[in-house]
Amino acid sequence: MTSYDFGLSGSVWLLVLSCLIGFALSIFVYRTTVPPISTRRKVFMIFLRGSGLALLLFILFEPLLNLVKVTEEPARVAVMLDNSQSAAMQDASVDRRAQYTAALAEIDEELFSDDNRVLRFDRRADRIENFAPDSLDFNGELSNISSAFKDVFNDVERDNIRALVLVSDGAFNAGQNPIYDAELLGRPVYTVGIGDSTEPRDVSVQTIITNELAYVGVPAPVNVNVRSSGYSEGEIAVRLLDNGAVIDEQIVQLREGANSYSLVFEYLPNEEGTRKIEARIDAVEGELTDKNNRVVEFVRVLKSKRKVVILAGAPTPDLGFVRSTLESNKNVEVSTFIQKKGAEYIGAAPTPADLVQAELIITIGFPVSSTSPEVVQMLAGALERGRPLMFMASREIDYVRLRPLEPYLPFNVSASQQRELLVTPDVPPTALGHPIMKIDGSGADGQYWNAMPPVFRTETFVKVKPEADVLASIRVNNAPLNEPLIAVRTLQNRKSMAVFAYGLFRWKTLGYAAEISRGRTQTPDVFTSFMENSVRWLTTRDQGKLVRVKTSREQYSSGERVEVIGQVYDETYEPLENADVRVRITGAEEPRDIVLTPLGGGRYSAEVEGLPQGEYSFDARVLVNDAQYGTDNGRFSIGEVSIEFQNPRMNAALLRTLSERTGGKFFAAGDLPGLYDAIKQHRGFQARPVSERSEIALWNLPWLLAAAVLLFGLEWFMRKRSGMV
């Protein structure tokens, strides 16, 4: 449907009046002519002059013609197809590739029309033009469902995408939880489950949990999580290897059904360097795949223990629990300085040497009003030298005395009162990826944090610095408040952390200990994990290196591209542009030399393809103006281990949740003929009207002026032919 609208810059009645005056003036001019002419010619010449004047007046009033064309844009569907390895593996009772092919054949062909969006995803999403069954090769090493939703996000409104179809096994292992991205789209998601949700007959190594740093001659615990399903009896040997050599072995008796087994090994490093720690299970007869029977981690072994200094404003339960937790770790050497009444200390007072030699400084309720300014300045001097800081609040802390330390903290204090509040943690899903917040690495970490007993916090208002991150905020009476509980900051290779609450020992006594007393032995110790993670993160640093080169991961599956990432800084830690970053990779084949491409901001990157299975090391060399500027090195491995085989069953719970939370519907692979009908029956699946407006500036058209000139020219020609002056 097209509508028209005509407009003038002035009143239409004024235009009509002006045109009438123009015709009246023409009549007046031609009422008597010399020589006399016929009435017919007189009328025609009046018409020519009046029309010419009317056209000129019409142009002067700047007429505009508006055209509005209204059409309907059809509702469209985005079809997202899983192209990862796990989507085509042999399941417990299903050949997923065959099931996938059959499902695509059952889906209404109209869903794959040119009007709809079709894309495939593995580690990233790619759009498919002219979809055909062979558009999928199932070679993806990762499953990033979130990337598919993000690819569609920018086009949802523009292309009127009213529904989404996800065909997948639901086993995502890259990117964030796709539920959050799906909800942001605001469109129903119809999921098609590929695979079998029953547990297959399989054994696998799920995870290795150990410290990123270890020390020569100091035992370090290595936790290995093993899973089995489909076996009712038998045993498996779980071996721990250091750089390929077996250092320990434990026997696991298999139980009926699906079970998890937690093993603790003791690793005693005997030389420094980067060591490859591997947990391995031999192939078991009848298991689904042996590609998930090993997991590798890398550990940096240093020469000596970590030295931690604790400064406390007074003896408190938090101090006791923090100190006992740290002292239980054989890799940590703790020195404690506790202030008593006045400026004195229980035992010796801290010295500049104590603080400078520390790898980490922890302040618990420090400083207080009686703390001497000299000690605060001594602490500020140690922080200026790059020592990491963990700040823990208390009721008696003096925030005025704290001001000299604010340049090294992740916050500034706006106002403070000693009135106490009971608060509980409110941890957003995005913060769970930070190493400090990791409890057992499962999807339940957020539940553990948000179920913690309440702790105390004063009415202290702080402003978190722009470069800092808030890992947890607070809830009061279950109402979330925009006030931080835990914040961290990394700036110019300096790390600091702040906990704005006290009474953290309650997490141990009212949380973990209370659950253990009820017989719930599987309850994680959140307080201990939090302290160990915090110390590990704060003390793991690059020693101020100006050249940092690493791989995006330490383990890759066979055939996967290896991404090498570099960062180069000058002496002021400003990004250094146009450096020449060269990397030599040595390992299972002839050495390979690559040059990293500058990305801007002091960042450099390159991808390496075609490396065979094996262990690799790399040496990086950076040249600036043809002179060597710095070096770095590291290790990685390429093997048959693929994260795609860690969870070899369909994640039906995720697919159903995606559909339920967005208003869609879950479909089994064999029940697809009604899929497109369900989409079309959804109340939101509607075409939308699209208006196209165009304006024609009639006054700017050259033919209007040409017509006026023609009319006046014709009148002049007739006047000359009639002998008129």
Image: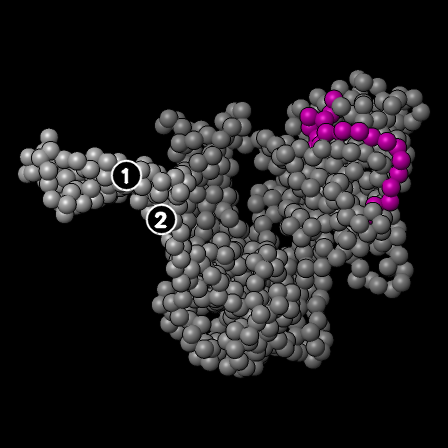
In the picture of the structure, the residue carrying the numbered disc 2 is 65
Front residue (pair 373, 81): 81
- Looking at the figure, which quarter contains the N terminus? bottom left
User: Counting other residues with Cα less than 10 Å from the Cα at mark 2, is it few (<14), some (14-19), or many (20 or more)?
Assistant: some
On the picture, is 444 further left or further right than 242?
right
Q: What quarter of the picture does the C terminus occupy?
A: top left
Residue under circle 1? 24
Going from N to C along the chain, the mark reached first, 2 or 1, is 1
Q: Residue at x 10, y 38 (%)?
A: 36
Can you name the residue that lies furthest to the right here?
Answer: 341
Foreground disc of the pair 2, 1: 1
* Relative height, residue 455 to residue 105 (above, below): above
The residue sitting at 46% across, 37% down in the picture is: 603
Q: Secondary structure at mark 2?
A: strand
Q: Residue at x 81, y 18 (%)?
A: 373
Can you tell which quarter of the image residue 304 is in? Answer: top right
Q: Position of residue 320 (x, y in %)?
A: 87, 40
Question: How dense is the environment of label 1, judged by Cα within 10 Å: few (below 14), some, or many (20 and up)?
Answer: some
Q: Quadrant of residue 136?
A: bottom left
| Residue 524 tag number | none
What residue span does the magenta drawing correspond to? 404-424
Q: Is residue 38 above or below residue 375?
A: below
Please say whether residue 410 is one of the residues in the magenta stretch: yes
In the rendered view, does 674 fall on the left or right side of 663?
left
